[in-house]
Image (tube, rainbow, N blue to C red):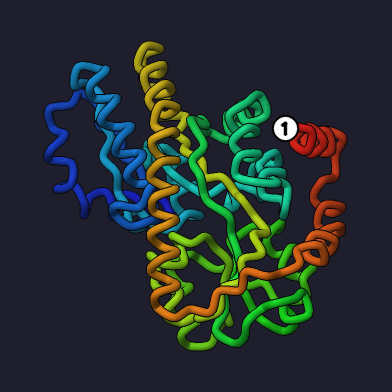
Amino acid sequence: MTALRTGLAALAATTALATGALACEITLRSSDTHPEGYPTVAAVEYMGDLLEERSGGRLCIEVYHSAQLGQEADTIEQTQLGVIDMNRVSLGPFNNIIEETKVFSLPFIFRSTEHMHAVVDGEIGDEVLAAFGHHNLVGLAYFDGGSRSFYNSERPIRSIEDMAGLSFRVMQSDVFVDMVDALGANATPMPFGEVYSAIQTGVIDGAENNWPSYESTGHFEVAGYYTLNQHLMVPEVLVMSQASWNRLSAEDQGLIRQAARDAVPHMRELWAAREAASEEIVRAAGVEVIEEIDKTPFIEAMAPVYERHVTSDALRDLVARIQAVE
């Protein structure tokens, strides 16, 4: 109930944001922890433009960025309860809720961005989205989350041995915790918004994320070593509350599904541009970027992570099918 009260209070405090949507019959409130202008935020706003146009102004989306409605773990609960209508979240926090999402969060499961796109845009991606339906959520679309790499304030990581003893923030996911542990480091689950101060004060040594998140949060200011080991390519997911969905007509549900999917190519264009810009800012700031690294020991160290989390025939089949995608 704490998350419910938090969500209600946040929505009440930000009512003024929705004044521009008063003419709409239905305004869907969407949450995002990223700041205004971030590709995921801009993509949902673009989706809202499509939806408003295609519905003749009946349907609108109001995006509450910058964690105005709470951090991801809280907003997931609020979306399940119907307090929040829509939510853009990384798949990581869903790993302990929806078993199928674990597979997309496995280290080195995707060989490249192109491979990841081929998987999520196809039959496998649709199957995983459908699994959200068992948890009071409707899966709408996948957005890019880039490749995630380790950064820290202590030393450059050039080999798996350099990971020893360092503490890294991870999302609240058992897969992520086990991944860091398997590399000989210490995993600390923590809300995204607390990472900067935790590194600055020495509570943790670093974290792992993509170029835009590393840059937009200012984490590069307190963690000046960034190793491009690219251990994860975890997609972002846009979901809707089942309760909010059920209040809509079949026609409006169709409009929302299509607008979400049509926003994906736009998001990918924004992501590519933002990724390049963030990398330029970080490099110009003097961060030591470690690019020459042998990934093989990192990949081999993931065997116990796969063994622990890919525990059913269904999940093993899912992994095999992903690896078989060209």
Task: Determine the residue positioned at 77% across, 71% down.
Answer: 183
The correct choice, above or below, for 95 with respect to 150 in the image is above
The correct choice, above or below, for 303 with respect to 61 in the image is below
Task: Determine the residue positioned at 70% across, 64% down.
Answer: 177
**105 sits left or right of 281 in the view:** right
The correct choice, above or below, for 54 with respect to 171 in the image is above
Q: Amino acid at mark 1?
A: Glu
Viewer-closest of 149 and 158: 158
Q: Residue furthest top?
A: 251
Residue 295 place in picture, x, y as percent: 75, 63
Viewer-closest of 128 and 283: 283
Quadrant of the image occupied by residue 127: top right
The C terminus sits in image quarter: top right
Q: Residue furthest front?
A: 292
**21 sits left or right of 100 in the view:** left
Task: Determine the residue positioned at 41% across, 41% down.
Answer: 269
Query: Can residue 58 be seen here?
Result: yes
**201 sits left or right of 63 in the view:** right
Task: Determine the residue positioned at 38% across, 56% down.
Answer: 34
Residue 38 place in picture, x, y as percent: 35, 52
Residue 278 place in picture, x, y as percent: 41, 62
Quadrant of the image occupied by residue 170: bottom right
Quadrant of the image occupied by residue 175: bottom right
Residue 146 place in picture, x, y as percent: 53, 52
Q: Secondary structure at mark 1?
A: loop
Residue where numbered disc 1 is placed: 326
